[in-house]
Amino acid sequence: MKIYINRQPRFGPWGGGAKTINRLAELFLSKGHTVVYSLQENIDVIFCFDPRPNAFGENIDHMYAYRKANPKTKIIQRVGDLGTHSKPQLTDLVRYCLDKSDYFIFPSQWSKEWIGFKGENCDVIDNAPMEIFYDNRDTNLQLGDQVRVVTHHWSTNPKKGFDMYQKFEEWCKNKNISFHYIGQLPAGVEFSNRTKPISAEELSKELPKYDIYLTASEEEAGANHVLEAMAAGLPVVYRKSGGSIHNYCNYYGEGYSEFEDMVEEVNRVIKNYSTSKQRVLEYTNTNDFVVNEYHRIVEKVHEN
C-alpha cells in the first residue's frame, strides 16, 4: 500500500502524538508499505492525524478532494486534539469531518463521547506509552524521608493546570514533600524546581526518580503524560475533569476536583503508598500495541 500520513515525523522533546507518528511510520515501512507525507499519485490510504494544514498546506478538504478524484482511496482519521483547550474552531472542524471520513480512531472513550460521534465506523484505542518508559521502572514500594512529586508537559496551554501546580508548590513548603516540573512553561509562570523539555529517552530515566505523579490538566482527549508516568511506576493523582485521564488512571491513581481534594489525595497516596504502587505496577500497556492496532485498521479499511 501507499499510505499518506499528513504529519511528518519529529524527533526530540515533542509531545506524545509526535512519538506515535514516528512509530507508526516505522511500522508501515517495516511491513513493506510506502509512506509519503504529501498528497501525490496512487495513494491507497490517507491517515489523518490532524485536519488542519500540514507543512505543505494540505488540510482535510484537500484530502476529501483527493478522494473524490480517486474514489478507491480511503481516509482514516485519528481524532486527537478536539480543540478542548480553548480552540473552538478546531472543535468545529473535527465535527465537520464526522460524517465525511471513512473511518475514525479515538484515543479514549471520553473523546468519542465528548465530540458526539454516533457512528459505528470507528475504534476506540487508548493511547499507551513508548516501551522505553518501562526500561527504568521504579518498583520500590517504600517512600524515603522526602516525598518527591513530579509532573511534565510539552504544551503551555492554561488548561494544563499551571495555577494548580503553583498552589501545590506553595503548599509543599515546610513539608517533607517536594514538587518538580519538567517541560515548557507559559510566560509569567516559574517553579523552584524545573527541568526544561527533554527527550523521551531522558524523560524515561528522569521520571523514576520521583515517587508520585501529579496532573492538573483538564479535558485531555488522549493524555500521554500520565501514561508515561504509570509506565515509570508512579501512582497518579489526577484531576477528575481531565477527560481521558480519568479513563486511563481511574484504577491506577486517585482523582480530585478542587485544590483541597488534590492535597488530600496526595496525602492518601503517601499514607497507602505500598498499595498505590502495587496497583500502578500492574499497568503494562505499550505504544507498540497501539500502532499495531492502527496498522490492523488500515488493512481492514483498505480491503473494504
Image: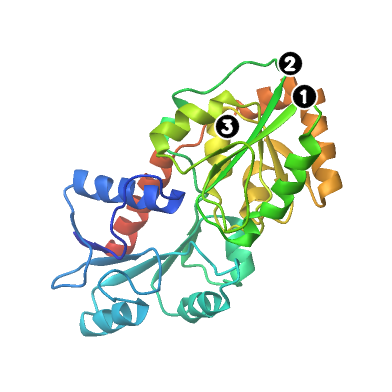
Q: Quadrant of residue 238?
A: top right
Q: Is residue 176 above or below residue 110?
A: above
**Residue of label 2:** 145
Q: Nearer the viewer, residue 98 or 18?
A: 18
Mark 1: amino acid: Asn
Q: Is residue 198 left or right of residue 247?
A: left
Q: Count every numbered label the image shows and give the total.
A: 3
Q: Is residue 12 above or below residue 300?
A: above
Q: Quadrant of residue 91?
A: bottom right
Circles 1 and 2: CB atoms closer than 8 Å: yes
Whether residue 239 is visible to the viewer of this picture, yes or no, is no
Which x, y percent locates residue 94?
A: 49, 75
* Number of other residues with Cα within 10 Å of mark 3, as a class: few under 14, some 14 to 19, many 20 or more: some
Which residue: 29% across, 81% down?
A: 62
Circles 3 and 2: CB atoms closer than 8 Å: no
Which residue: 42% across, 79% down?
A: 100
Quarter of the image where the C terminus is located: bottom left
Query: In terms of secondary structure, where does tag 2 sit?
Result: loop
Q: CA distance from mark 3 to mark 2?
A: 26 Å
**Residue of label 3:** 283
- Label ID, residue 176: 1
Which x, y percent locates residue 67?
A: 27, 79
Which x, y percent locates residue 186?
A: 57, 57
For marks 3 and 2, the one nearer the N-term is 2
Colour mapping: rainbow
Query: In terms of secondary structure, where does tag 3 sit?
Result: loop
Q: CA distance from mark 1 to mark 2?
A: 7 Å
